[in-house]
Image (cartoon, coloured by chain):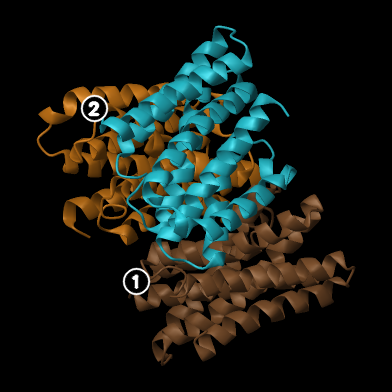
Chain colours: A cyan, B brown, C orange
Amino acid sequence: MTILELLDYTGVAVFAATGALSASRKQLDIIGFLFLAAATGIGGGTFRDVILGIPVFWVVNPTYLIVCVTVALVVFVLAHRIESRYRLLLWLDAMGVSAYCVMGAAKGYAATGSPTVAITTGVLTASFGGIIRDLLANEPSVLLRPEVYITAALIGAAAFTGATVAEAPLWVASAIGMGAAFIVRGGALRFGW
Amino acid sequence: MTILELLDYTGVAVFAATGALSASRKQLDIIGFLFLAAATGIGGGTFRDVILGIPVFWVVNPTYLIVCVTVALVVFVLAHRIESRYRLLLWLDAMGVSAYCVMGAAKGYAATGSPTVAITTGVLTASFGGIIRDLLANEPSVLLRPEVYITAALIGAAAFTGATVAEAPLWVASAIGMGAAFIVRGGALRFGW
Amino acid sequence: MTILELLDYTGVAVFAATGALSASRKQLDIIGFLFLAAATGIGGGTFRDVILGIPVFWVVNPTYLIVCVTVALVVFVLAHRIESRYRLLLWLDAMGVSAYCVMGAAKGYAATGSPTVAITTGVLTASFGGIIRDLLANEPSVLLRPEVYITAALIGAAAFTGATVAEAPLWVASAIGMGAAFIVRGGALRFGW
């Protein structure tokens, strides 16, 4: 498994978990869990691939769908035991944004070679999943602080793209991008930025 | 005309009628009828084709647009004579979901050969049209009971895909899938499941 | 630069300005300006290109993204000096609709040769940017009078397509289409149609 595949599975699983937690907070049934987990897990990446004109990742490799279903079932069984589902949702969402802003930028850069396009697809990919989830679950959009959310995705995508243009190895650029996004988003959650 | 083309025209016409009935309930003018009929009629299939990376059906064959326009005009002339437009909307919508979960699964299976992808595109295609209509017309989303709605699409898509994998002829698999979805959705409407 | 490129840049810049003005009305920070300007500026054209199955314009040519960023920064600096940002937003939006209904129809006609498809992509392209902006900024959808808005796009797209089918030169057809749309939309703003 390559670094990018690992990032992609992580992003899908983590966003699927946030979708399932939203379903749990709304006390939906198992179908609601499956639908929200899948829509949130694959939404951002679907949008990215359609815009870039490349085959949609889960159509090529349905394993991503199995990941969403598995995550939805696990959260369905365990969610009521978790003390603060909203707190957990916020932190998982921060991880998802960090993974997805890098994935989006990496695919955008690979498809076009343009740093501007890479940063744009990074931000769009990272923010789309959360927007879809909050719209479908009727939660306050992108979890209270939309501007910090988008700022985190922008900084992460720009850091990854900058490191890539400077010819850093892929795993270094990915770590820098994810770290930068997570520090901004996590800092906002922890210290109320 | 093949079975799938027939299903596609039926799905488009029936969903277009529900869009036009929504326009009627909101007392929109003729432009509102045309827009809501077209958006609802072609919305689900557009989404399906874009995700599967195949040419969008109404771009290839504009007859589908003519169907939407015709349906919108007919409903515009007749709608005020119908006693319960909402009741009719609900039942037409149930027909549309049944036709579209099979169409979505059939196209997804044909494009990828994966049952998992087929079931997913079946559910997405069937639910997308209704979500778009309710969003644009500002009706309660997917008509009151979103979970039964998605369950019906899921069961219909799974039944069609299962029958197809078991090598049932196309018309048998289509009948099984549509029947299963319509029984679940219709039962929910009739008996308040 | 061709006529169509000029129209496309105009549509992107003008819609980006309406997105930035929405951000200003909501007192968002600079990131909010950038996001709303980009989403509104490139939203309609992205939708058009994805549906037509052609490469998305700003992925091919990132200059469009630079235009959005520049417009967002200019509006960020100047917006507080403008007396009625809403009034300006309405008129810029009317210009954007006029440019985009022609661009959408032109690309749809070039891709398919079908007048029906051309008119449909014209209306969808012109209305999608405004719908996205109003959804994200939580403004009343397509600025108060959705039906006149869609009517303007429909008349502009139909006028352009009619002139093109009648073999009018591109610049004549474009001027007729834009003029027709702008008269309808502007008349609605000025005289309360």
Looking at the rendered structure, the kind of residue marked 2 is Val
Residue that appears at 32% across and 58% down: C146
Looking at the rendered structure, the kind of residue marked 1 is Leu
Question: In what element is the residue under mark 2?
Answer: helix
Would residue A52 be seen by someone viewing this image from the given angle?
Answer: yes
> Residue most toward the top?
A166
Which is closer to the viewer, label 1 or label 2? 2
Q: Chain of mark 1?
A: B
Would you identify the image quadrant in which residue B182 lies?
A: bottom right
Q: Is residue A23 above or below residue B100?
A: above
The answer to the question of whether label 1 and label 2 lie on touching residues, with beta carbons closer than 8 A, is: no
What quarter of the picture does the C terminus of chain C occupy? bottom left
Residue that appears at 70% across and 61% down: B119
Q: Nearer the viewer, residue C56 or C95?
A: C56
Q: CA distance from mark 1 to mark 2?
A: 35 Å
Residue C6, position as x, y percentages in the image: 44, 27
Q: Nearer the viewer, residue C57 or C181?
A: C57
Would residue B70 be seen by someone viewing this image from the given angle?
Answer: no
Labelled disc at residue B28: 1
- 10 Å crowding of disc 1: few (<14), some (14-19), many (20+): some
> Mark 2 = which residue?
C75
Q: Chain of mark 2?
A: C
Question: In what element is the residue under mark 1?
Answer: loop
Residue A89, position as x, y percentages in the image: 42, 46
